[in-house]
Image (cartoon, rainbow, N blue to C red):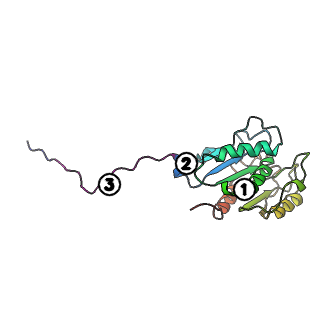
């Protein structure tokens, strides 16, 4: 019986070491819910299931409309990421993200701001001016928390693109939009314009 021995190719490079999932992600993203968080039927939760590179904001208390508290949580969420992140926010989370981006534009690549809400005692006058990063606001004609005109005015104040999302209530689980495919189109738009990426 003859045995044929194969010899390894001298020029074959060593196999690359596996990299963490976050390094292979198409982008870094943080999901920022509104007051009381997002339940499993919310489009944010559905996006998280399909895009494992999205990170969840961690909060001990989702009930307090305290911008400083929310922005501190954003600091903690963004600190370990290797590059600026896209913040995907809903409701009160939009205000927290806009304020954070104004303060730390080096950590934020872009903002997707869906159905902004401004609970008392805050007013629109508390929400700063032009954002230093690309942003888009999406609002509904039937949102009980902010009228379409106020959302459009807020987008103008922030220097953000604006899209009328139609009759979708507060653009949440109760809106019956599932994974909200139109919102995914907005995210794609933002990713083509985001800053701070290679």
Front of the two marks 3 and 1:
3
Report the residue at 75% width, 54% height from top: 103
Residue 7, percent from left and from top: 19, 50
Look at the image and tell me in which quarter the N terminus lies: top left
Q: Residues within 10 Å of mark 2 (few under 14, many from 20)?
A: some
Residue 160, percent from left and from top: 77, 63
Number of callouts: 3
Residue 122, percent from left and from top: 89, 48
Q: Which residue bears the numbered disc 2? A: 22
Per the image, label 1 sits on a secondary structure element best described as strand
Disc 2, disc 3: CB below 8 Å?
A: no
Residue 173, percent from left and from top: 76, 44
Q: Residues within 10 Å of mark 3 (few under 14, many from 20)?
A: few
* One can see residue 82 in this view: yes
Label whose residue precedes the other's in the sequence (2 or 3)? 3
Front of the two marks 1 and 2:
2
Q: Left or right: where does residue 43 sit relative to residue 18?
A: right
Label whose residue precedes the other's in the sequence (1 or 2)? 2
Q: Which mark is residue 46?
A: none
Label whose residue precedes the other's in the sequence (3 or 1)? 3
Alpha carbon separation for disc pair 2 and 3 = 24 Å
Q: Left or right: where does residue 129 sit relative to residue 177?
A: right
Vertical relation: 189 (above or below) 52: below
Disc 1, disc 2: CB below 8 Å?
A: no
Q: Examine the image and state in which quarter residue 198 appears.
A: bottom right
Vertical relation: 22 (above or below) 106: above
Q: Which residues are magenta?
A: 5-20
Q: Which residue bears the numbered disc 1? A: 112
| Residue located farthest toward the left when viewing the structure as drawn | 1
Q: Which residue bears the numbered disc 3? A: 13
């Amino acid at each position: 019986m003859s045995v044929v021995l194969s010899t390894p190719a001298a020029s074959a490079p060593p196999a690359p070491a596996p990299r963490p999932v976050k390094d292979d992600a198409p982008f870094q993203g943080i999901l920022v819910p509104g007051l009381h968080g997002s339940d499993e039927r919310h489009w944010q939760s559905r996006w998280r299931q399909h895009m494992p590179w999205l990170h969840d904001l961690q909060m001990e208390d989702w009930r307090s409309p305290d911008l400083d508290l929310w922005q501190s949580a954003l600091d903690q969420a963004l600190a370990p990421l290797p590059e600026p992140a896209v913040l995907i926010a809903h409701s009160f989370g939009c205000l927290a993200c806009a304020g954070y981006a104004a303060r730390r534009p080096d950590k934020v690549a872009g903002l997707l701001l869906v159905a902004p809400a401004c609970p008392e005692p805050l007013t629109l006058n508390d929400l700063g001016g032009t954002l230093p990063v690309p942003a888009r606001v999406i609002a509904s004609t039937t949102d009980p928390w902010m009228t379409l005109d106020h959302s459009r005015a807020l987008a103008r104040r922030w220097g953000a693109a604006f899209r009328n999302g139609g009759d979708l209530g507060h653009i949440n689980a109760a809106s019956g939009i599932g994974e909200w495919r139109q919102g995914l189109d907005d995210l794609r738009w933002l990713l083509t314009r985001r800053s701070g990426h290679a």
